[in-house]
Image: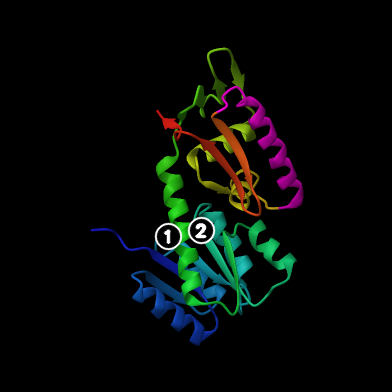
């Protein structure tokens, strides 16, 4: 029997919190609801959760502060922020401290559920695909030794080149979301790290150029896609 997904939710609007909990429970999720950040901080350690939904503006402890505390104990759990704030600075702040998604109020409950499902699919996919060795077309990629080789040469990759190519391989023929890659590799979503990632993408394209069946595409407004006729074989 498949284990149900358990959601950790902090929302100080009692009516909204109850509506969201009832809706998500009706969709098959287990939901623990807390009325403020302080109560949430105490409750988080009592259960094992699969995803967090945090209101930003809460009494006693705001959502950003709570997210930082959660990240200190669990660096991988997905976090969705709910807020009435629409300022770009606030959205960036949410991503910088480890948020995976950001919904501004008002929003539809269906949209929230779809975003939850998308994040859980992505997280599940990453866990199942993380491997130490890939065959990419004519190349062999050893993620542990950080080497990319073909019949002519062996190239030693930098750590960030290695991490970025690993993410691309784990998501072959699918979009690797730009913000996810930035948070996973650089830890912070900002302009300078985004420019740095573009440079590494260019380097990887050059390293893979000898195989015409391999391409790293820019997906406008979303991220990158490693295009290959057959998905990389994990060994």
Out of 222 and 95, give the one closest to the viewer: 222
At numbered mark 1, what does the secondary structure look like: helix, strand or loop?
Answer: loop
At numbered mark 2, what does the secondary structure look like: helix, strand or loop?
Answer: loop
Is the magenta region chiefly helix, strand or loop? helix
Magenta region includes residue 208: yes
Q: Residue at x 36, y 74 (%)?
A: 25
Q: Is residue 84 above or below residue 148?
A: below
Q: Which mark is residue 78?
A: 2
> Which quadrant: the C terminus?
top left
Tell me where the magenta segment starts and ends, as one range: 190-212
Question: Mark 1, residues whose alpha carbon is within 10 Å: few (<14), some, or many (≥20)?
Answer: some
Out of 82 and 70, give the one closest to the viewer: 82
Location of residue 160 in the rendering, given as x and y in whole percent from the top left corner: 64, 35
Residue 98: image quadrant is bottom right
> Which quadrant: the N terminus?
bottom left
Magenta region includes residue 47: no
Location of residue 198 in the rendering, given as x and y in whole percent from the top left corner: 70, 41
Look at mark 1 in the image and give the residue it sits on.
Answer: 50
């Amino acid at each position: 029997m498949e284990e149900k997904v358990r959601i950790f939710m902090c929302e100080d609007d009692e009516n909204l919190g109850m509506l969201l909990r009832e809706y998500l429970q009706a969709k098959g999720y287990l939901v623990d609801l807390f009325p403020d950040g302080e109560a949430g901080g105490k409750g988080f350690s009592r259960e094992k959760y699969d995803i967090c939904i945090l209101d930003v503006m809460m009494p006693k402890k705001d959502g950003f502060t709570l997210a930082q505390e959660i990240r200190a104990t669990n660096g991988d759990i997905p976090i969705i922020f709910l807020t009435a704030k629409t300022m770009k600075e606030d959205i960036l702040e949410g991503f910088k401290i480890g948020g995976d998604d950001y919904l501004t109020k008002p929003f539809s409950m269906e949209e929230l559920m779809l975003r939850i499902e998308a994040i859980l699919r992505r997280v599940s996919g990453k866990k199942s695909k993380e491997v130490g060795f890939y065959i990419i077309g004519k190349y062999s990629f050893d993620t542990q030794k950080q080497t990319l080789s073909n019949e002519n040469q062996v190239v030693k990759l930098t750590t960030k080149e290695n991490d970025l190519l690993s993410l691309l391989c784990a998501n072959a023929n699918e979009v690797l979301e730009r913000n996810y890659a930035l948070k996973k590799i650089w830890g912070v979503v900002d302009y300078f790290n985004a420019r740095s990632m573009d440079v590494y993408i260019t380097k990887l394209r050059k390293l893979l150029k000898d195989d015409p069946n391999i391409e790293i595409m820019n997906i406008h407004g979303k991220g990158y896609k490693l295009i290959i006729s057959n998905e990389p074989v994990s060994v």
